[in-house]
Amino acid sequence: METTLISGGAGFIGSHLCDHFLNKGHTVICLDSLVTGNQKYIISKKNNKSFILIENDLTYMRLADFPQLHIDNILHFASPASPQDYMKYPFITLRAGSIGTEILLELAQKHSARFLLASTSEIYGDPTIHPQKEKYWGNVNPVGPRSIYDEAKRFAESYTMAYKRYLDLDIKIVRIFNTYGPRMRLNDGRALPNFMAQALKGKPITIYGDGTQTRSLCYITDLIDGIEGVIYTSYSDPINLGSPEEITILELAQRIKKISNSKSEIIFKPLPIDDPTKRCPEISIARKVLGWEPKVTLDEGLILSFSYFKQALSGEYS
Ligand code: UDP
């Protein structure tokens, strides 16, 4: 059976990956500093003999600090990822994308492991090409407030590709577009958790800007299936994973309001600097290479998420 190391294993996506690979019979090494991860998702697995927890900041670790067992797969998901979080933790974010990537690439080389980098649609910045294809190089402000995350991930992609080109490491890069579902932090500042919490509490739903900006939201289970597909493919160029179902932020707010039967009013606040005006993945590579596309529609996913947020707000998941 395989051993899979997941950095950021207590985070939203990382914790779903830990469960997924434990269910597949893998030994899972979960590495997380808990700066934005949630201890709850670790505690439930602590008695599982196949689950090894390293509660540490990856970027201060040496290779000798990792468990002395053979590792087959390394999935690098450690990083604050919501705009609110990465602006709150700028240096942690920059270090996770740079030093963190370096350390895990070295570890992967030592073990001849597969290395998968969790990259992001943010590397396209505020795109001038729509929808975004992997071949598009992006439109990123290298010194803007979002550059903390965008440029760290762009550097991580470059470092990862260098390991492929010069050291023949088995690498994969997934560019993850907006993803949602159970285990998102209620207070991570993203649109979906904010709208869910505001709708449930009957508080005003806060739209930044006029709400015409678009995003495409992928349900978590679809993303996990896509990531698993990528790990085992021989394709090593970046692959977009996300939903091609594009929606304006205003429409998202209205749908959440409807699903939750909320009386919250919708209010408008200033748009953050460099906020992308549109975002939607072109996923023909994922379709062709992995035979993957999202199965859960936005309406289905929102209903599933709504029950989670309702329970989370009532304290059940806090
Ligand atoms: N947004 C919003 N209200 C909120 C939070 C976010 O209108 O309470 C907007 C945000 O400005 C952006 C979009 O929703 O245009 C998606 O933001 P999110 O933080 O979810 O993630 P992003 O896609 O920007 O990384």
Image (cartoon, rainbow, N blue to C red):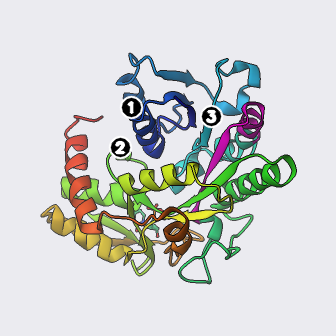
**Residue visible at 32% across and 47% down in the picture:** 182
Q: Earlier in the sequence, mark 1 or mark 3?
A: 1
- Element assignment for label 3: loop
Which amino acid type is shown beneath numbered disc 1? Tyr
**Residue visible at 64% across and 20% down in the picture:** 69
Which amino acid type is shown beneath numbered disc 3? Asp
Q: Is residue 285 left or right of residue 188?
A: right
Q: Is residue 316 left or right of residue 64?
A: left
**Residue visible at 38% across and 31% down in the picture:** 41
Residue extent of the magenta highlight: 102-121
- Element assignment for label 2: loop
Foreground tag (1 vs 3): 3
Q: Quadrant of residue 202?
A: bottom left
- In the rendered image, residue 51, in percent from the top left (x then y), is placed at 47, 23
- In the rendered image, residue 184, in percent from the top left (x then y), is placed at 38, 47
Q: Residue 108 or 36: which is nearer the viewer?
A: 108
Q: Is mark 2 within 8 Å of ligand 1?
A: no
Which residue sits furthest right? 166
Q: Do we see residue 82 in this rendering?
A: yes
Circle 2 is placed at which residue position?
A: 183
Q: Is residue 301 left or right of residue 122?
A: left
> Marks 1 and 3: CB-CB under 8 Å?
no
Please, is residue 5 above or below residue 160 in the view? above
> Marks 1 and 2: CB-CB under 8 Å?
yes
Q: Earlier in the sequence, mark 1 or mark 2?
A: 1
Circle 1 is placed at which residue position?
A: 41
Circle 3 is placed at which residue position?
A: 72
